[in-house]
Image: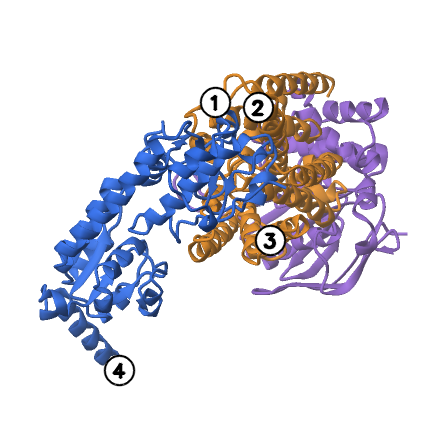
Chain colours: A purple, B blue, C orange
Amino acid sequence: MPAIDVENVSYQYPSTGFALRDITVQISRQSFLALIGPNGSGKTTLLRLLSNAVQPHGGRILFDGKPLSDVPPRELARQMAVIPSEQYFEFPFRVKDVVAMGRFPHIGRIGRMSAQDWEIVERALRETELDHVKTRAVSELSSGERQRVLVARAIAQSPAVLLLDEPNAHLDINHQISIFRLLRSLHEKRGITVVVVIHDLTAAAAFCKSVILLHLGKIVKSGIPEEVITTDMIRQTYGADVMVFPSPLGGFPQVTYQGFNREGAKARID
Amino acid sequence: MRRLLLTTLLIGAWFFSACHPRDAGKPGPHDTHRIVSMAPSLTEALFALQSGSQVVGVTNYCTYPPEALQKEKIGDFINPSIEKIVSLNPTLVLAERWSSSKVVSRLRKLGLNVVETISPLSLPEIYQQIAEVGQATGKSKLADSLIQEMRKQVEEIRRRGENLPRRPTVYVEIDVPSWTVGRNSFITDAISVCGGNNIFGDVARPALQASVETILDRNPEIILTFQATAAEIRHRPGWSNLRAVRNGNVIDDLKPNRRFNGSLRLVEGLRDFQERIIKWGSLNGDSPQLIIKWGLKWGQSPKINHAK
Amino acid sequence: MKSGGKRLLALLLFTIALAGVSLVIGPVHTPSAAILWHVRLPRVLLAILVGAGLAGAGAGFQGVLRNPLADPYILGTSSAAAAGVMVAAMLRIHHPAALYLFSLGFALLSIFVVTRIARTGGKTPVQTLVLAGVIVSLFFNAAVFLFFSIFYRESFSILFFLLGTLTEGDSTLITISGFMIGAGLFASWILARELNLLTQGEEAAFHLGVDVENAKRILFAAASVMVAASVAVAGMIGFVGLIVPHMMRLLLGPDHRVLIPASALGGALFLIIADALARSLAPPLEIPVGALTALFGSPYFIFLLRRKQRMGEF
């Protein structure tokens, strides 16, 4: 049974009209899926629909066979964690206290954190390389460290499904790679389903098992990276003058584009 | 558009005429005055000085004499209707001098003849106010004789007060909670004339909000209350042990809008209050002979509120 | 958490000690039993209750709205509750139940209106919410002053009610307010973990398993109950709900399981001191304690605002 079943879903904004039109997609367990598409294609809206943050205006979304909107927030949070692209921390909670918030769906309003709960928190801190700052106030951290705190908090939820919106927006290339390696290893070791909205097409191709390309609120193509991320598809949807060729390191698609050479002339690509 | 123009013209014309002194604004012969009074005590003085028929406007709080109720209302002194005052076309506006108020200067800018009197803080200043009203209305002689009469009666009361065997301590509550008067109020002066001592006579202000524990600590023998009733005073937590409450000397029927105000009628209020003090003295064991000697008619005295 | 418990206990003991000491502070140097029993004790009790209520409500508002500048005074809840009290007085309903019903009704109404005005596209951004609070506060202040200018002849004690004072000695009112504030604090404390999660943002809290709308409703209601109960007995005492939770956050950290009780105790402490000052600064005059807290609170608010500006967070 698929983890998330999206059936003929539409969503529209009151002012700008349809963001998504008649989307049908099945996200099975064990998938590691990238949602790509140009700005305004509806990929973030689709992620918000999947996370139950907004409700579709047409069609329905099933989670483990049940209507997603019927799942109580706490029960859903035990199954699904969401990592936003950024979060503003107003109050100076310690890093480990923020990560421990991930245990809320398991312990509830007045339950106590058990030794096992703290062990899960500690492990999440280690996995995200936050061990050394765990007693610092989260408001004092760098933006890259704060992004990892959000990942650690989600991991501490022990979810079956992990949804991410632009997780690498604030990360340098080293941390971008380490986040995706971590996601991939969580996926491999614990069988966590991952759905990630991503702009970096090369990263999508390098780390994800499948890709959905959205354009103007519709799914243009879905499949393995090699099928979706092609020179033609990207030029068609993004309208960008790019070229896709297999990476010398692993054969997955890699995107490059026309720039300027030393003399200021356009470098030629076809 | 035409209507707007017309309105603008009308307002302009009014403004022009209002800004310039008119005949009506000039002081005319005294007996043809059209007077607006801006305070209850001024209204009372005007009627006492037989200028009542010339009064065309009074404040909402001018309730004495009853004829005053028939006059046009202009609001209160702090926030009067300037329009209304102007529409009454007065030749004389009488107001008490309040440094914080801009009403008088506004009325003067509109070309009105405004006479400011003293805002009395003591008995002599009450006399002075009456004299000033007399001067403004050309009734100085009448005012002088009224003042002389009032002064005579007050001095009589004062003499009696000074002869009292003991002076009671008095707490005056002009408003809840615990608003009272200090040294700079004619009420403190009046209490003193009657033979009592204001427990807050040491505070150099006209009015103050006294701390409740100070009132309990100073333990007044008589309470004079203008807003709260005697029953309300008795039921306040901690007040039941006050000497005034225990002995039933809480007076709540001498309201300022009746006789305890800064006008000629104050004499009546003083007489009443002194009677209460004498009764207080007799309840405390002073001999009834003394009271007879002071020549008071017991039959006419109002009832005292006894604590129940 | 453990050190938080210890510090809370220390704060509790300090508050009790200070309450005791404050009983001997006042304009009368050798107070009689009646003064101690009927004047000072009710005042100290009232300072504890109202301080705890306002600071507890402030901590709740700041958490739900993710804004350390939120306060019942700034959001207009206090003004609304005061307008409720004025309406009850205007209608000459003197029954205590009516007093509390009106002040609570108006407080809830103001919260409803403020969150409604501020709600755009299914979300309640903090900036618009605080702005809405200011607008609603201005509206109810205007209503209060309208009532005041029409009815002030009745009694100008209302003016001092508006400035806030702890002179109410009616034991029935003190008891009712005590129960309401206790209930409000308890409800806020029970939801402390949800409050912690709400500080991460409503959507984050939702994804962490919080029933956001429900939690917000309870927390807003609890805060409104505390504000209404405080205003009904003591008028508008401002800035306690702003200063105290902020200071407690500096001292004990942002965890609401500690912060809610700490704010309650800190608020009690703060008002005990402020009221001791109010009654003994200029004897035998009574200074409205609300004027003192505002005098201290406004510069503190500006200090907070400037600090946030410097840190580039505003």
Nearer the viewer's eye, disc 2 or disc 3? 3
Q: Residues within 10 Å of mark 3 (few under 14, many from 20)?
A: many
Taking the view exactly as shown, the residue that stands out farthest to the bottom is B2
| The label number, if any, that marks residue B10 in the structure image | none
Q: Residue at x 53, y 19 (%)?
A: C25
Q: Which residue is mark 4?
A: B3
- Is disc 1 in contact with disc 2, using a CB cutoff of under 8 Å? no
Q: Is residue A39 left or right of residue B93?
A: right
- Is disc 1 in contact with disc 3, using a CB cutoff of under 8 Å? no
Q: Are marks 3 and 4 on the same chain?
A: no
Q: Residue at x 28, y 44 (%)?
A: B153
Give how far apart the Cα atoms at labels 1 and 3 are: 36 Å
x and y percent of residue A157 in the render? 79, 35
Assign a secondary structure to mark 3. Answer: helix
Q: Residue C209 versus residue A37: which sits nearer the camera?
A: C209
Q: Which residue is mark 1?
A: C27
Q: Is residue C140 visible?
A: yes
x and y percent of residue C152 in the render? 44, 52
- Is disc 2 in contact with disc 4, using a CB cutoff of under 8 Å? no
Q: Which residue is mark 2?
A: C250
Assign a secondary structure to mark 2. Answer: helix
Give how far apart the Cα atoms at labels 1 and 2 are: 34 Å
